[in-house]
Each structure stands twice: as C-alpha cells, then as structure tokens.
Image: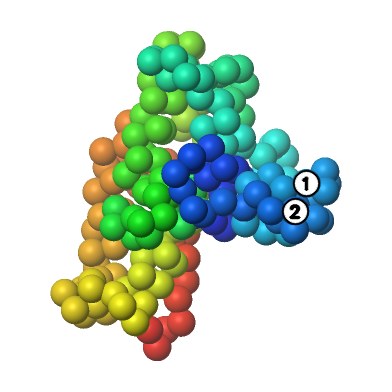
Amino acid sequence: MFGDSLVDVGNNNFLSDSMLKADLPYNGIDFPTGKATGRFSNGKNAADFLAEKVGLPTAPPYLALVTSDSQRKLNDSTNAMVTGVSFASGGAGILNGTNEAFEPIPLTQQVEYYSIVHNQLVQEVGLACANTHLAKSLFVIVIGSNDLLTYFDKDSQVSKQYTPRQYVDLMASTLKQLMKVAPMVRRWETIVRVWGINPAPPDLL
C-alpha cells in the first residue's frame, strides 16, 4: 500500500520530526479499540475497508515493523511480507516537494522502503517463490491530492512554474518513472492491479 492520509494506518506516528500525526483522541473515537491509531480518521480508513473486502488483515505500517538495527530488518517479517505492508504517509505526494516542510514520507521514499521489503522477501523464500507471490499480490497506490492542493495554494511557487496541465503531466510522468524503478515482478503495468490518483474537481485541471 502506497499513498497519503487516505490510507495511512500509522506510519506518520513514527516520524519524530513530522507535524502531520493523527494521534489525538478523536482520531480513533470510532475505531474498534476506541483509541487513536495514526489513521487520519475517526475510525477505519480506505485501507481497512479494502483489506476487509479481499479477506486480509489490514497491512501494518512499515515503520512499526522496522527495528533500529543498521540492516533495517523487520520484526515478524514473514507474516508482514506475506500479508502486506503499508508505506502510506499522511501529507505525502508524488512529488518530493509536496508538503516538504511537514516531513511526510514522499512516494520516492515509500518505493525505497518497498525495495527493502522486496529484498527481504527474496532472502526469506528465494527469488522464484517471491516472484510467484508478488505476481498474485495487490498493489494499491492512493496519492496525488496533496500535490494538487500544493499547486493551488495561494502561496504556491509551483503554480508560477507550470500551467495546470503541465503540472498534472509532471505528476503522471513522475509516478510512472517511480513504478518502473521499483523491483516488482515483470513490468509494473501488469503488477499494479489498482492505481488510484486522488481525484480533483475537473475545473481545477
């Protein structure tokens, strides 16, 4: 799971310098535990509902699984890698400069984290088994709205550099390039089953 606050299940709570955290009591008031979980919601979010739909547990936040050792190994790595990991971060965008002052995990870093998990999976089960597993996996990307909000902010500098169409084209080309460098099985177009760029009103484009 890659994306922003619509599917962040707690990664931002592990970012010590980030101002974008969902750790206040009302953030989890309607969650089954009644406590804040790092979701930017009063209860479950889109990641939870999708997991329920396909009959899997919600993928845990990547940063909750990472230990402090230099090799960045995952605790309980086998279960996490088999059932899924979430790299989503509230405030993140396709472009690195989006919400940079608030220090979310940009999509480029999320892809790097995925590369770590991919390599760990190969070490655990071997390349052939890893490829077979990933070929049957569901990759979800929910991102883009923060980039658009940044563009249309009244103090935006990027709106002075690009027309709306040029900016959207930049978002699309950047996303395509990131997916090409990710170590997925076969070509990325055949692996990404669901590709969601958060919508914006047509009159903004």
For the point 24% across and 48% down, the residue is: 177
Q: Is residue 191 left or right of residue 78?
A: left
Q: Which mark is residue 35?
A: 1
For the point 47% across and 71% down, the residue is: 199
Amino acid type for the residue under numbered disc 1: Lys
Q: Is residue 153 left or right of residue 20?
A: left
- Count all numbered tags in the image, as a single digit: 2
Q: Give 127 or 107, whichever is nearer the viewer.
A: 107
Q: Where is mark 2, residue-wise?
A: 25
Is residue 27 visible in the rendered structure shown here? yes
Q: Give 191 or 120, whichever is nearer the viewer.
A: 120
The image position of residue 204, as x and y in percent, is 38, 84
For the point 42% across and 84% down, the residue is: 202
CB atoms of marks 2 and 1 within 8 Å: yes
Picture quarter with the C terminus:
bottom left
Q: Is residue 47 left or right of residue 194?
A: right
Amino acid type for the residue under numbered disc 2: Pro
Q: Is residue 46 left or right of residue 141?
A: right
